[in-house]
Image (spheres, helix red, strand yellow):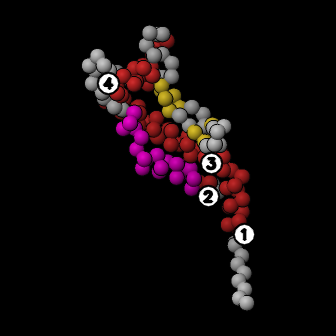
Amino acid sequence: MARFESNLPEDLIKTFIDLEENTTNMMKEMTSAGAKTVYNNVIKNMKKSFKSSKRLEKCLKITKAYKTYSDDAVNTKVGFYGYLDGDKQKPAPLIAVAREKGTSRGEAKKPFMRKSFVKKEIELSMNKVQESYIKGE
């Protein structure tokens, strides 16, 4: 009967053990890096869709990375929160959606959020974080 033995290098085994221990932290950093990429793209695209976007930029936030209870996925959100300059008559998410999708009153849509999710850029920033964990930096 044939017999085969194989040994993995110890440094490779150590890398796998370190990755197993730090998976959650790595995923949180990866999603945060992707969210920062999207955040920068949204800021850049808002300047094209609005005459003055300074007030709305203050309402654009990145949440902390968190694990979901249902499936233990790691998420980081980029979104509009609050009101423009504290004025309760002007909710920032409503203004952003009206510009993104248009209104029934005739305002044409000028999408800026959808254009901000460039898959290649997001994957590139996330892969940089992943490589730093794999190389042990």
How far apart are labels 3 and 1 at the CA level?
22 Å
Write the residue at 44% across / 9% down.
Answer: 89
Question: Viewer-nearest of labels 2 and 4?
Answer: 4
- In this image, 135 relative to 21: left or right? left
Badge 3 or badge 1: first in the primary sequence: 1
Circle 4 residue: 102
**Label 1 Cα crowd, 10 Å radius (few <14 / some 14-19 / many 20+):** few
Badge 2 or badge 4: first in the primary sequence: 4
- In this image, 72 relative to 91: left or right? right
Residue 95 can be seen in this image: yes
Circle 3 residue: 26
> Majority secondary structure of the magenta segment?
helix
Q: Which mark is residue 10?
A: 1
Indicate the amino acid at tag 4. Gly
Residue nearest the viewer, comparing 105 with 126? 105
How far apart are labels 1 and 2 at the CA level?
15 Å
Q: Residue 127 magenta-drawn?
A: yes
Tell me whether circle 4 and circle 1 mark residues in contact (CB < 8 Å): no
Write the residue at 36% across / 22% down.
Answer: 98
Question: Viewer-nearest of labels 3 and 4?
Answer: 4
- Label 1: which secondary element: helix
| Range of residues picked out in magenta | 113-131
Could you tell me residue 25's position as x and y percent? 65, 45
